[in-house]
């Protein structure tokens, strides 16, 4: 190695003066660019830190408490639905409040889930290695698995699965679909999750002119339709969104004829006329060079839509949302909750006379006292998020209801999911 280094050094001594000048000129430019990139990185890091500090207040509760010791049953997260109540909880423990683990602004996120949950699968109670009990298989292969402490559906390349539903044509006129999807590092176009819609009462293709999947990538989404023999293609991507790999929240809303698709807080598709009303759906996975890659989904939910928030308040004196989500056994808001919170904040700013009592509700899992305290702390977290969105604190009060006012039975996942909710009662 020393001999090689000496040889290179001697070679440089014999380079002509003109060549030397060109070399050092290029070296100077490279050093200048390197310094410029270093300054840019430092600036971005500083801005990122300042943004995280601000968003910790919005997505967390603004305060940190020491974590309480958990029993073994609490080590694995069982349920990540809205206003989750703890399962198998030690009655002597206090609900845990922490800052949000990942600061995201989601300030322009305007996805609002449907009012009534018609399918909810957190994969609780599933056996690893078995096919998911609440799904059917159209092609490929899928199985229950774990990624870290979380339950997932792992899918092989070109797999398609569809939910098992009691009703044949189960998608209503207005609906939302949500799930978390795992994206690997690498080119965004190499991996997609394909949502297929059908009009009929089965999952067989009914014509290539109409039925094309909505392909969701880690940086955006694409689809195309044909209306009266007029083909339309929709394709939108964001380089910033595509920089992040790992788990992403996918949200789809359909309203009579329009279709929206979100990848995290990025609205990738906004189609005013999709061309037909879906009645069934399936989820597929596709990956170029799939060896060693993870394709998985979790936390799948389908909900029926309803009236706009303000219309609900005028009709019922309150509105109920199941789209405000929290970490398990915590009062920490998930970033996807900001769709509802942004909508509420905008409504309260447009109607300054509105005042609300924010009520937290849980299902019946866990001890009554735990659920009561947790529901109040979550209501407080919602109020804090609205304050950080510009709403006057005097326009809101909070109340924890625990499991005392169920609106559905607690015997099914959908029933529990409908009981886990936040209500805004007009005062």
Image (cartoon, helix red, strand yellow):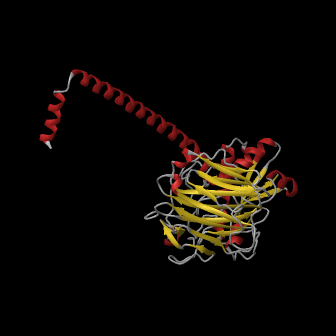
Q: Position of residue 66 (x, y in %)?
A: 51, 56
Q: Is the N terminus in the top left, top right, bottom left or bottom right quadrant?
A: top left
Q: Position of residue 100 (x, y in %)?
A: 56, 52
* Name of the residue lying farthest toward the front: 229
94 left or right, relative to 116:
left
Q: Residue at x 55, y 72 (%)?
A: 140
The residue closer to the viewer here, 87 or 284, is: 284
Q: Residue at x 72, y 43 (%)?
A: 391
* Name of the residue lying farthest toward the right: 315
267 left or right, relative to 64:
right
Q: Position of residue 31 (x, y in %)?
A: 34, 30
Q: Is residue 170 visible?
A: yes
Q: Is residue 263 visible?
A: no
> Which image quadrant is residue 283 in?
bottom right
> Which image quadrant is residue 6 in?
top left
Q: Position of residue 136 (x, y in %)?
A: 63, 76
Q: Residue at x 73, y 46 (%)?
A: 345
Residue 37 vertical placement versus 317 (above, below): above
Residue 234 vertical placement versus 365 (above, below): above
The residue closer to the viewer here, 400 or 215, is: 215
* Name of the residue lying farthest toward the left: 3
Number of numbered discs overlaid on the protein picture: 0
Residue 19 vertical placement versus 200 (above, below): above
């Amino acid at each position: 190695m020393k001999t090689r280094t000496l040889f290179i050094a001697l070679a440089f001594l014999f380079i002509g003066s003109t060549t030397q000048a060109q070399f050092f000129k290029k070296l100077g430019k490279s050093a200048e660019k390197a310094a410029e990139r270093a300054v840019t990185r430092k600036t971005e890091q500083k801005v990122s830190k300042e943004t995280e500090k601000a968003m910790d207040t919005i997505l967390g509760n603004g305060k940190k408490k020491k974590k309480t010791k958990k029993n073994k049953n609490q080590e694995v997260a069982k349920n990540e639905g809205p206003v989750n109540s703890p399962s198998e909880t030690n009655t002597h423990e206090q609900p845990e409040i922490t800052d949000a683990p990942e600061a995201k602004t989601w300030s322009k996120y305007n996805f609002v889930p449907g009012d009534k949950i018609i399918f909810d699968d957190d994969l609780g109670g599933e056996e690893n290695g078995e096919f998911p009990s609440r799904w059917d298989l159209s092609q490929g292969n899928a199985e229950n698995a774990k990624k870290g402490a979380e339950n997932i559906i792992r899918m092989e390349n070109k797999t398609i699965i569809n939910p098992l539903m009691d009703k044949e044509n189960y998608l209503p006129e207005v609906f939302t679909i949500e799930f978390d999807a795992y994206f690997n590092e690498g080119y965004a176009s190499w991996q997609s999750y394909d949502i297929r819609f059908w009009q009929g009462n089965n999952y067989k293709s009914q014509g290539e002119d109409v039925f094309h999947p909505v392909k969701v990538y880690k940086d955006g989404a694409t689809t195309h339709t044909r209306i009266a023999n007029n083909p339309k293609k929709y394709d939108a991507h964001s380089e910033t969104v595509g920089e992040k790999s790992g788990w992403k929240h996918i949200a789809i809303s359909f309203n009579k004829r329009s279709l929206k698709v979100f990848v995290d807080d990025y609205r990738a598709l906004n189609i005013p006329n999709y061309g037909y009303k879906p009645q069934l759906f399936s989820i597929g996975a596709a990956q170029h060079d799939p060896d060693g890659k993870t394709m998985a989904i979790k936390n799948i939910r389908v909900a029926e839509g309803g009236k706009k928030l303000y219309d609900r308040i005028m009709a019922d004196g309150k509105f109920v949302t199941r789209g405000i989500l929290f970490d398990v056994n915590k009062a920490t808001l998930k970033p996807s909750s900001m769709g509802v919170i942004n909508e509420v904040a905008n409504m309260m700013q447009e109607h300054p006379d509105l005042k609300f009592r924010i009520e937290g509700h849980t299902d019946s899992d866990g001890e009554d006292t735990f659920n009561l305290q947790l529901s109040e702390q979550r209501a407080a977290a919602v109020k804090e998020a609205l304050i950080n969105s510009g709403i006057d604190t005097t326009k809101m009060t909070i109340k924890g209801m625990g499991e005392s006012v169920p609106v559905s039975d607690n015997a099914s996942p959908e029933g529990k999911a409908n009981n886990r909710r936040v209500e805004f009662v007009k005062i």
